[in-house]
Image (cartoon, rainbow, N blue to C red):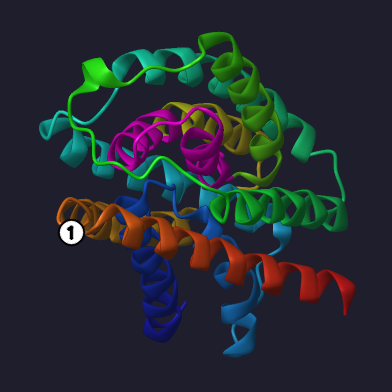
Amino acid sequence: MDLAWIMTIFFIGFLGSFISGMVGIGGSIINYPLLLFIPSALGFAAFTVQEVTAISAVQVFFASFMGMLVFRKGGLVNKTLVLYMGIPIITGSFLGSFVSNTLPSPIINIVYAILALIASVMMFLPKKGNDVRDLSQVNFKKTLAITLALLIGTVSGIVGAAGAFITVPVMLVVLKIPTRVAIASSLAITFISSIGSTTGKLMGGHMLLLPSLVLIIASTIASPIGAKISKNINTKILQWILAGLITATVLKIWISILF
């Protein structure tokens, strides 16, 4: 592969990982459509949907890990929330990644589009916008959190997305978690979830070594930068950035499916 191809993959990974660290998602909501459409649009060999979900899972793993480390130093990761949602998510994502290997590409695209549409709608609903930094003030319904996490893990494992792009809206709208705590905790949960999805993809045989390595390097650089910037941005702005990203992705995926 030539340098232009490598730089294209690196840019896609850098952008997705930067956004990952900033708004608490794994980056797959950005990388999935870009990896699917950009290389072929520039004249490079197109990735299959199975290959995109596999290398996206690797990118999510490293981007969420690096972003989590930055937020953990700031004391914003709610360990109780991570525990109650992390275990069900990794269980569901591991199962979902195996199911994905048996599904045709159109089905995977539709699952992804439906998830993104739900997340987009939720981001425009009223949310708890305060900037609580004392984790002792954060309360949530544990049974509801477990149930939602298991569902998110299963369906997100199918698309190799680790579920963060819908986990954050669920935390904000349903569980009423403050924005910065939701972002920090989501990255920790996403990291846990990505262990299951990445393992499943590796065992499924769709992982491509070179693009995965390029995305790992991009994630290691970009995610901590996004996380550090996130700490100094108004929470409302962070919410609108995430809402805009999810909505744009929804439009792109549904247009490709319908037309």
- In screen coordinates, is 223 left or right of 118? left
Q: Which amino acid does label 1 sit on?
A: Ile
The main secondary structure of the magenta stretch is helix
User: Any magenta on residue 176?
Assistant: yes
Q: What element carries label 1?
A: helix
Does 136 appear above or below 108? above
> In screen coordinates, is 38 left or right of 80?
right
- Residue position for label 1: 229
**Around disc 1, counting alpha carbons within 10 Å, would you say few (fewer than 14), some (14 to 19), or many (20 or more)?**
few
- Measuring from the top left, give residue 170's x and y in whole percent: 55, 36
**Residue 199 versus residue 218 in the image, above or below:** above
Q: Quadrant of the C terminus?
A: bottom right
Magenta stretch?
A: 161-190
* Residue 156, quarter of picture: top right
Q: Is residue 208 visible?
A: no
Q: Quadrant of residue 110?
A: bottom right
Q: Is 164 or 210 nearer to us in this picture?
A: 164
Query: Residue at image x 29%, y 53%?
Result: 235
In the rendered image, residue 177 lying in the magenta stretch gets the answer yes
Residue 83 x %, y %: 41, 13
Instruction: Name the spot of residue 119 as percent of width and height, x first.
Output: 62, 49
Q: Can residue 178 be seen in this view?
A: yes
Rendered position, 258 above or below 44: above
- State the count of labels: 1
Q: Residue furthest left?
A: 73
Q: Where is residue 128 in the image (x, y as percent from the top left)?
A: 41, 40
Tell me the residue at 23%/21% (across/down). Answer: 135
Residue located 69% across and 49% down the image: 118
Residue 187: which quarter of the image? top left
